[in-house]
Image: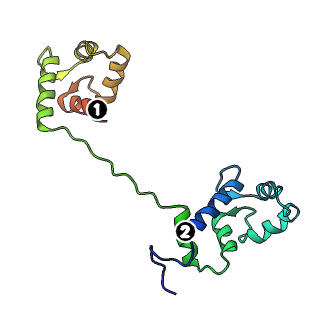
Amino acid sequence: MPALSKTSSKYSKKEVLKLKEVFDDQDKDGSGEIDVNELMESLKKTNLGSEAVDMFKSLDRDGSKKIDFSEYVKVYYRYATPEDVKEMMLWAYPVKEEKKVEVKVLSDEQKAEIKSIFVLYDTNNNGTLCKKELTEALSATGYDDEEIEEMFEDFDGDGNNEIDFPEFCQMLEASYLA
């Protein structure tokens, strides 16, 4: 039998999704599986309560003592092929597309602006920022000493107790582009 296309199926997607709702109602702990106690609990409201254990055994096709939705589907749709069941499972558990993470990069204009800020903060003109220079500069922008210390430790990549321009850029990228 050819694989089912996305647009046609001999089974109703709406019906399968309704069956999934019933399954989820019985799955009291939200584990994605129904155990015998959950089945018994859900059948208490019906005249099938006394038959729960036998029903459970017939539903638990793999003997795992738990019923997952695919087992549920296979009993409900006895004549469904493995391809049919796979399609129904995709209806019930659609594959979620991963969101593409946009990598943000500083523009040349932003880098030039950061360079001018760096030069302004570098009061001793040695091309790096020591803790004192960074603390004086960032205290005026609302950061407290603890935050500045943490930033210094995080971005002093080479451990020389100074922040050079590339480290300063990384620090600002992390703070403002994240």
Q: Nearer the viewer, mark 1 or mark 2?
A: 2
Q: Amino acid at mark 2?
A: Lys
Task: For the C terminus, give its image quadrant.
Answer: top left
Q: Left or right: 65 with respect to 152? A: right
Tell me what residue is drawn at x 14 percent, y 14 percent.
Answer: 123
Determine whether the residue tagged by mark 2 lies in a helix, strand or loop. Answer: helix
Residue under label 1: 157
Q: Left or right: 149 with respect to 134? A: right
The answer to whether residue 158 is seen in the rendering is: no
- Compared to residue 29, the image places residue 10 above or below, namely below
Q: Count residues near mark 1 (Cα–Cα under 10 Å), then give few for <14, some for 14-19, many for 20+.
A: some
Q: Which corner quadrant of the image does residue 113 belong to?
A: top left
- Compared to residue 89, the image places residue 158 above or below, namely above
**Mark 1 to mark 2: distance in Å?**
55 Å
Tell me what residue is drawn at x 72 percent, y 61 percent.
Answer: 66
Tell me residue 175's x, y (percent): 30, 30
Q: Left or right: 158 with respect to 7? A: left
Tell me what residue is drawn at x 56 percent, y 62 percent.
Answer: 92
Tell me what residue is drawn at x 22 percent, y 28 percent.
Answer: 168
Q: Amino acid at mark 1?
A: Gly
Tell me residue 35's x, y (percent): 75, 58
Q: Which corner quadrant of the image does residue 37 belong to?
A: bottom right
Choose between 46 and 33: the one closer to the eye.
Answer: 46
The residue furthest bottom is 1
Tell me residue 29's x, y (percent): 69, 49
Tell me residue 43's x, y (percent): 80, 59
Residue under label 2: 13
